[in-house]
Image (cartoon, helix red, strand yellow):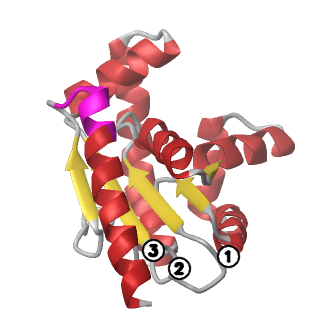
Amino acid sequence: MERGRGPVIAVSGSPGSGKTTYARYLSEKLGLRFISGGKVFRELAREKGLSLIELNKLASVDPRIDIELERKLLDEAMKGNVVIESHLAGWTLRGVADVLIYVKASLKSRLERISKRENRLIDDVLMETSWREAIEANRFLSLYAIDITDLTHFDIVLDTTYLSEEEAKELLFSLTRAILKKRLMTS
């Protein structure tokens, strides 16, 4: 942990994995700011007058979209005292974040969560989520050499498929606090 900066926690995961829920919870429990990469991406789409799918398509051919998003998230990380959640935060904030967390869940669980959250049919969510994940995985690998299946550098990888939201929150809080405490002692 960089002295004086305050902790930086990066939370990544696939759509519907719970990354926003758990990142927001950690920020509240630890008294840190909360930044959502998804919210920043949606703001970029609005600024450009595009839908999320249109912006994703544009980002697949124009690296400036992701660069702008990741620059904004890095700027927030450098201020410290923050939990940042985004699909790529665990890779792009590596070396800056004090704790890297990856949250995952089965496809079925993720689709059910998204369907419930957005009040949409599972079949529609499946089509959009499958398309989005395929295009993003390809984009991240081809443009940035980030293999989103490589989780080896994460401090915490938690599968939330069979955990209640409360169980997952408490586990993540306990593990994160322990890692921060040890990192603080060694810096």
Q: State yes or no: discs 1 and 2 in contact (Cβ < 8 Å).
A: yes
Would you say residue 11 sits in the magenta stretch? Answer: no
Q: Amino acid at mark 2?
A: Val
Q: Position of residue 165 (x, y in %)?
A: 31, 28
For mark 1, does the 10 Å Cα neighbourhood hold few (<14), some (14 to 19), or many (20 or more) residues? Answer: some
Instruction: Identify the mark nearer the N-term, 3 or 1.
Output: 1
Q: Residue at x 36, y 49 (%)?
A: 134
Which residue is tagged 3?
98
Q: Nearer the viewer, residue 14 or 20?
A: 20
Looking at the image, the residue that sits furthest to the front is: 185
* Lateral position of residue 21 relative to residue 8, left or right: left
Secondary structure beneath dot 2 equals loop
Residue 109 appearing in the image = yes
Q: Nearer the viewer, residue 20 or 16?
A: 20
Q: Is residue 158 above or below residue 7?
A: above
Dot label at residue 138: none
